[in-house]
Image (cartoon, rainbow, N blue to C red):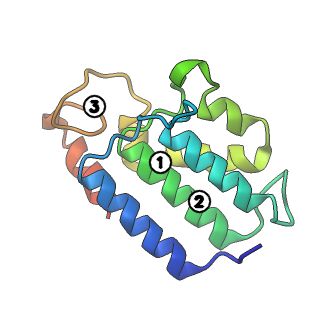
Amino acid sequence: MKKNEPGDYLAAKRILSRMLKLSAKPNSTDSYGNSCLMRAMLAARQRVVADDGFPEQVNNRALRSDLRAVLRLLVIAGAKPNSVPRGNETTTEFAAREPALADLLPRATTSGAASRCALTPHQPSPVDPCGQQPSSGCATRAKGELL
């Protein structure tokens, strides 16, 4: 298996960030009904199974940090870890089956703008990617964190 290449990760993160800034929909689904967040979690699982701490944890700190950053980008952009597209399980339910995966998702959903936006019930706004009313400043913080 290929090692975690910093250049590959940075390029991919820049592309994801750019797509989200250009209004990519983080809750859209693929042909199997997987959300973007679920697809990212499935890809993360493929990377962490080779880690010597799997299934309990991810010992490779760089890999863990990279995967959390990608998941966090999606959540900040509005991906909903507890939504169930087309009858599939939620990303949270999928991650809960393996402690190493569960460790990746909660940090992505409970820090920074993500905790204020993705998990807080509020009225959706067409201007703000995380649904908060524009006067709260949430959109500015979230967009700043996409960089």
Query: How far apart in space, not on screen, are marks 1 and 3 (Cα)?
Result: 16 Å
Q: Is residue 33 left or right of residue 115?
A: right
Q: Nearer the viewer, residue 116 or 13?
A: 13
Q: Residues within 10 Å of mark 2 (few under 14, many from 20)?
A: many
Element type at mark 2: helix
Q: Position of residue 17 (x, y in %)?
A: 35, 60
Q: Is residue 137 left or right of residue 11?
A: left
For mark 2, what is the residue?
A: 67
Residue 111's disc is: 1
- Residue name at image x 82 percent, y 64 percent: 50
**Quarter of the figure with the N terminus:** bottom right
Residue 54's disc is: none
Seen from this angle, which residue lies furthest left?
135
Element type at mark 1: loop
Q: Which residue type carries mark 3?
A: Gly
For mark 3, what is the residue?
A: 131
Element type at mark 3: loop
Q: Which residue type carries mark 1?
A: Ser
